[in-house]
Image: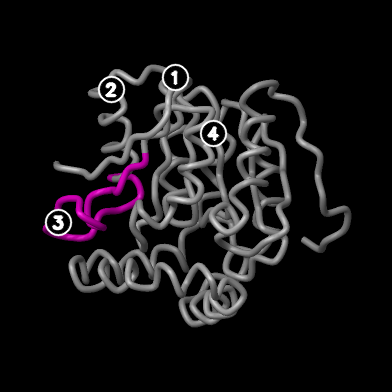
Amino acid sequence: MRAQVLEAGEGPVLLLLSSMLVRARTYLPLIRRLSKHFRVLTVELPGCGRSARVRRPWTLSAYARWTARLMQQLLLGHVVLVGHSNSGGVALLVAARYGGCVDRLVLADSIGARRERSIPRVVGARMVDAFLEWGLNLRAWWHIVYNALRHPRSFFHQVKVGSLAALLRHAPQVRRPTLLAWGRRDHTMPLSCADRLRERMPRAQVYVGSGSHDWLITDSQEFTRAVLAFAARGEVVARLATQHSL
């Protein structure tokens, strides 16, 4: 299955799975910063972007199997695996089921741990985050439109998956060191999601950024610092938010 992969930089391999609702190019500000420290491979998964169309929408499990095979075919060895939003669900399942190819896992505002799961509620919350991230949306709105037009069935299926996914039962199977990197003002996948994941992941730590759902792009410098500290030392990353409700 053909996939679009952007490569930049040198050093330890960092595999960034772009969310299936956008394109790999949406992450360019982050890729530029990470590539100063890592060999960054950013993947547009099948059914989104310029990657191959799929006959029917894929499940998160199918994406996880495909990603594990891709890592084997590229002979990547142990990588820092980064998933964001919908692709965070994929990255979590890769680490839970194919952990031998993952050295460290980074989940940024991932789906799968929301307490209130409903499509209208999550879509409404995403609109709030879009307002907070107006600069990013002004630059990259057409990436979303591109996916919706080129991969309509997959796109709208991913909207449903992102709203309804329940992945907490898989979290205890992740044995690799994990960084749960979350935006303090994320309404789509609130900070309480990170708490629920951390409670079930034996080697997880939380870093709270200052932004919203896509803060790893809008605040790429801060996100890169957090990843560097996590990847280099494996120490507990300082938590910025001292109080928030579960």
Q: Which residue is mark 2?
A: 72
Write the residue at 67% across / 38% down: 225
Sort mark 3 into few (<14), some (14-19) or many (20+) by Cα contacts within 10 Å.
many
The magenta segment: 42-62
Q: Main secondary structure of the magenta part?
A: loop
Q: Amino acid at mark 3?
A: Arg
Report the quarter where the N terminus lies: top left
Indicate which disc residue 53 carries.
3
Q: Amino acid at mark 1?
A: His
Q: CA distance from mark 2 to mark 1?
A: 10 Å
Q: Amino acid at mark 2?
A: Gln
Image coordinates for residue 69, horizontal then vertical, percent: 26, 29
Image coordinates for residue 48, horizontal then vertical, percent: 26, 57
Q: CA distance from mark 4 to mark 1?
A: 11 Å
Position of residue 207 relative to residue 12, above or below, is below
Q: Which residue is mark 1?
A: 78
Sort mark 2 into few (<14), some (14-19) or many (20+) by Cα contacts within 10 Å.
few
Q: Earlier in the sequence, mark 1 or mark 3?
A: 3
Indicate which disc residue 105 carries.
4
Picture quadrant of residue 8: top left
Q: Earlier in the sequence, mark 2 or mark 1?
A: 2
SS for callout 4: strand
Q: Earlier in the sequence, mark 2 or mark 3?
A: 3
SS for callout 3: loop
In the rendered image, the residue lying farthest to the right is 242
